[in-house]
Image: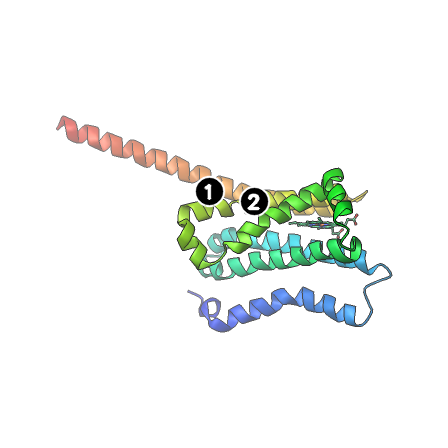
Amino acid sequence: MNPRLTSKGIKAVVFAACLGPFGWLAWRGLHNDLTSDPVAYVTHYTGNWTLRFLVITLAITPLRSILHRPQLIRFRRMLGLFAFFYVCLHFTTWIWPDHDFDWSAMWKDVLKRPFITVGFTAFVLLIPLAITSTAGWIRRLGGKRWQRLHRLIYLIAVLGVVHYYWLVKSDVRKPLFYGFLVAMLLAWRLGGWLIGRRDKAAADAAARERSVTAGTM
Ligand code: HEM
């Protein structure tokens, strides 16, 4: 076991690193350095960081097994919550400086523009995951139900990519790149699930055979 990954300090380091993009944005904001269109800049910046944190969060499970570092699980909740933190900033930018709290215009936007509908859905789905991310909620829901609920993260990541793909006007390379990453991360899980099913079927068949053999003895 890597002692650096289990030390208390490392969590603080990862936390500070996750806050880095926000710190950089705040620094540029304080120095009036958010380009000639600050609202668009902040929207794009926070949208990108939301998607990055979603991808990093999804990458933790495969990385644990590929790198033989099960301790990486310690960071998954924090990373997921940072995805939520950045999407809250993204959403707040849309509500406040972008729409100036004009709820009816925002609602029209959600209903009329497919990329907003999809982004909004992803945001709404992230809320229960953020709320139930604590140990208390795992206990309350029970491990199985909690896991089932948190599988929504797969759908949220796909919606995030679709949101990005639909909003870009011409150059779709970046959304396609994120789409590729999300597809790989989901394929890895699907592969694990299929292998698990095959192994279980083989184990069940072996158990059946053993009981038949025992019965004929
Ligand atoms: C998990 C949820 C979300 C993710 C992952 C996400 C991600 C992104 C990304 C990656 C971009 C483009 C950044 C770039 O061009 O460099 C973006 C732009 C944008 N997002 Fe989101 N977003 C999410 C939710 C939302 C929500 C809830 C809203 C508002 C209701 C929203 C409104 C926008 C807008 C207005 C833009 C800019 C569109 C443009 O420039 O034409 N997003 N988002």
Q: In this view, does 39 lie above or below 125?
A: below
- Left or right of 93? Residue 83 is left
Q: Which of 182 and 136 is in front in this view?
A: 136
Q: In which quarter of the image is residue 197?
A: top left
- Frontmost of labels 2 and 1 is 2
Three-letter residue code for mark 2 = Tyr
Q: Where is residue 21 in the image (x, y as percent from the top left)?
A: 68, 64
> Which percent across, then down, holds residue 183?
60, 42
**Residue 46 image label:** none
Spot the residue most to the right: 36
What colour scheme has been applied to the protein in the rendered image? rainbow
The correct choice, above or below, for 60 with respect to 200 in the image is below
Task: Say what amino acid the circle numbered 1 marks.
Answer: Gly
Depth check, front residue: 68 or 8: 8
Mark 2 → mark 1, Cα distance in angstroms:
15 Å
Q: Residue 217, percent across and down? A: 12, 28
Determine which quarter of the picture holds residue 49. bottom right
Viewer-proximal residue among 45 and 113: 113
Which of pointers 2 and 1 lies earlier in the amino acid sequence? 2
Taking the spot 57% from the left edge, 67% from the top edge, the residue there is 15
Residue 91, given in percent of the width and then of the height, sits at 70, 54
SS at badge 1: helix
Within 10 Å of disc 1 (Cα), the crowding (few <14, some 14-19, many 20+) is few
Q: Residue at x 71, y 57 (%)?
A: 92
- Confirm or reject: label 1 Cβ below 8 Å from ligand 1: no
Q: Which mark is residue 154?
A: 2
Taking the image as drawn, is residue 181 in sight? no
Mark 2: secondary structure: helix
Tell which residue pokes out farthest to the left in this image.
Answer: 217
Report the disc number at residue 192: 1
Q: Is residue 188 above or below residue 27?
A: above
